[in-house]
Amino acid sequence: MSTGFGLIIVGDEILSGKRQDKHLPRVAELLAERGLALSWAQVVGDERARITAVLRAAFEGREPVFCCGGIGATPDDHTRQCAAAALGVELALHPEAARLIEERMRDVAAEQGVPFEPERPDNVHRYNMGVFPVGASLIPNPYNKIPGFSCRGPGGAEVHFVPGFPVMAWPMLAWVLDQRYSHLHRQGAWRERSVIVMGAMEAALTPLMEQIEAAHAVKVFSLPSVDHPTYGRHIELGVKGAAPDVEPAFAELLAGLRACKAEMGPELVRP
């Protein structure tokens, strides 16, 4: 089965509905492209005590976790401080982060045709974006050089912190997956196969699903729909797991559906 990852999304704007979350589907895609998958996801608002509690649980877990949002330096950004509190460590300006932040400020000044003024209050404040929990390692940001960071919990779980902006977060998460977890990649080894079953009820198909899971090292899934524009009321019924296990399990699933005279539509394959 695939290695599980966790995802934490931080921000009042998601919970209030002011913005729609885009991280969950994209993170799922990034993982699936590498034969990996999410085990869980959680959205938390901009409340320090709650963020700290969620991060503490993540650090005490076993799977790697991505955390998107709240690592800036405005009053409503609390994730860096909460990560330190969850780990019981101090915050400190990371030397390499400071260098990258200064490099970014110099680049912006050059683009604007003005001298770089390191003592200007807004420039001094920008260094706060490099204040991370002691012991953190950096995640490079190809968009504007302002890095994210990673921390390891007492149980060995790593939590990787990136900005909330998708244009920054997604390439940073891809870098983490390719640089830190390439040994877990299973491209081509993980597969889903499913079939559309017309007008079916999940309860009627449950015995068949249990039979398949008991006989094969796969997960069986059912995705019901009551108002699909093409298929109407139907269930997408399928299996997922390592490619060699999926094929015989799916064949048995189809045989079981034919035996109960289920009306089947198209078959779907997802690598």
Image (spheres, helix red, strand yellow):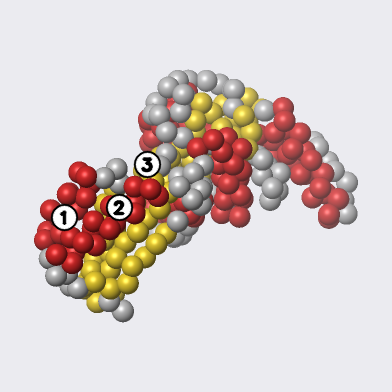
Nearest to N terminus: mark 2 or mark 3 = 3
Where does the image place residue 29, in percent across and percent down from the top left?
48, 54
Residue 1's disc is 3
Pick the residue in front: 57 or 120: 57
The quarter of the displayed image where residue 233 is located: bottom left
State whether residue 6 is above or below residue 188.
above
Where does the image place residue 143, in percent across and percent down from the top left?
68, 50
The answer to whether marks 3 and 1 mark residues whose Cβ atoms lie closer than 8 Å is no
State whether residue 187 is above or below residue 234.
above
Q: Is residue 175 visible?
A: yes
Q: Secondary structure at mark 1?
A: helix
Q: Residue at x 37, y 55 (%)?
A: 192
Circle 3: residue type: Met
Q: Measure how far apart labels 3 and 1 are at the Cα level.
A: 21 Å
Residue 248's disc is 2
Mark 2 surroundings within 10 Å by alpha-carbon count, few (fewer than 14), some (14 through 19), many (20 or more): some
